Image (cartoon, rainbow, N blue to C red):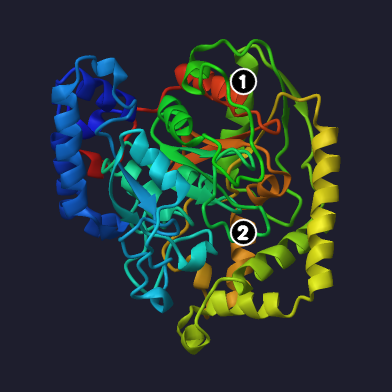
Amino acid sequence: MAQLHDLTALDAAAAVRRREVSPTELVEHALDRIARLDVQVGAFVTVTAESARAEAAAAEARVLAADDPAALPPLLGVPTAIKDLNMVAGVPTKLGSTVFAGFVPDYDDNVVRLLREAGTISVGKTSTPEIGLPCYTETDIGPPARTPWDTSRLAGGSSGGAAAAVASGFLPFAQGSDGGGSIRIPASVCGLVGLKTSRGRVSRGPLDLDSTRLSVLGPLARTVRDAAAFLDAVAIPQPGDPERLPAPADGFLAQCERDPGRLRIGRYLDPPMDAEVDPEVRAAWSAAAELLAGLGHELEDSAPPIPPEAIPHFETIWAVSAACAPVDPAREPGLRPLTRHLRERGRAVSGVQFADALAMLNVFSRRGIAASAHLNAVLTPTVALLPRPIGWFQEPDGDPAEDFERQKRFTPYTAIYNTTGQPAISLPLYQSREGLPIGVMLVGRPGGEAALLTLAAQLEAACPWRDRVPPIWHE
């Protein structure tokens, strides 16, 4: 028998407009599943049940009062959640760390406000690792975020809680952020669609402290269309945004109904760093290439857009971003070893070295984008390995330098496209022999989310995954 969490975000919004289900029913169902089941997956760090119920009641009143339900906000009544790196006024924001205990912002990030204006209802804050730095979600403030496909394994990061929440049937979609793969990695590990948007596509205001311009905001969702609907809600330029990318006149969701035509798609397997690719990941990548060819697309071998010599520059920028996080010096000893390690590396970088690293990454990115300009998209694995067991990154002795090296070996593809600023989407096309999700990544041209979503929707139609759910789904 179908349950409310079987509904996609678009299904739920349509049912609300038809008055077949109420926002209160959707929110209560989400809160019930979180209360009963989140102990298994560690998706939430804060649940805002009281405010969610109040917003649901208000949304229900709007539905009942509406003369024309089509005029209601497009996602009215749909539950979602906000990653605990993003600000929600009046809600504790811990940034995955003990050192931010007691911090309660007095403003909303633009993406939070835009989601609310579209009608979604946040039920809380999802777990994230300390300051969002690692590609896995283990913290000192709560349990690790686990993939519901095997709860002995991590959900990825840094949007690990968001991915665990959606994959477990708590929410149809959730907000994430991605500075080196933090949407796409957990999407791959948890069997979801994860869209890293183009640099500048979604506002990071009103207070944007990311001088590296690596991080962007986007959705984790069960379907491509839900990801597109999320993007339509938040891809609205705001005052003060440094870049304003034009959106399709008919919106991103409409692109999912188009035929992509015959595309030229590059593919590569060897990343620009030393990393061994699991044979089952190789097989999934190869199967995806065959699927694309079977749909009529032209495949050609290509190369990563940035060379191996660019990697140290990225690491310099990553370390400086860690050092720039506003931590009370008196609380610095309370940070986790990896965070302290990266901050120490960042503090050792001079202003000239930082500027040089930014400049060199810009040079490498421009060259790479120019070299692949004839391609409509590029296919790679999302991550190189199957989902990692809890504690794997800190083995064998908790050395933070080895932790960082293991992260590089696990996810050698994703950060490339934070460097170039291109959009990229992880699609849950395949599973391992053990039933673990394996995502593949498609990368679009700069600003090319519309064409990327069209292609992704074609792949979803050819190899559907919506009904492939983990055991927790039926609890």
User: Which amino acid lies under the numbered mark 1 shown in the image of this protein?
Assistant: Leu
List the residue tagged with mark 1: 292
Query: Measuring 59% from the left and 56% from the top, which residue is drawn there?
Result: 410
Dividing the image into 4 quarters, which one contains the C terminus?
Answer: top left
In the image shown, does 44 or 391 lie closer to the viewer? 44
Secondary structure found at label 1 = helix
Tag 2 or tag 1, which sits nearer the N-term? Answer: 2
Dividing the image into 4 quarters, which one contains the N terminus?
Answer: top left
Residue 215 at what x, y percent from top left?
59, 52
Residue 74 at what x, y percent from top left?
34, 25
Query: Measuring 48% from the left and 60% from the top, which residue is drawn there?
Result: 136
* Residue 29 visible: no
Query: Measuring 32% from the left and 66% from the top, which residue is drawn there?
Result: 143
Determine whether label 1 and label 2 are within 8 Å by CB. Answer: no
Determine crowd level at label 2: few under 14, some 14-19, many 20+ residues with C-alpha closer than 10 A.
some
Secondary structure found at label 2 = loop
Q: Nearer the viewer, mark 1 or mark 2?
A: 2
State the mark number for residue 210.
2
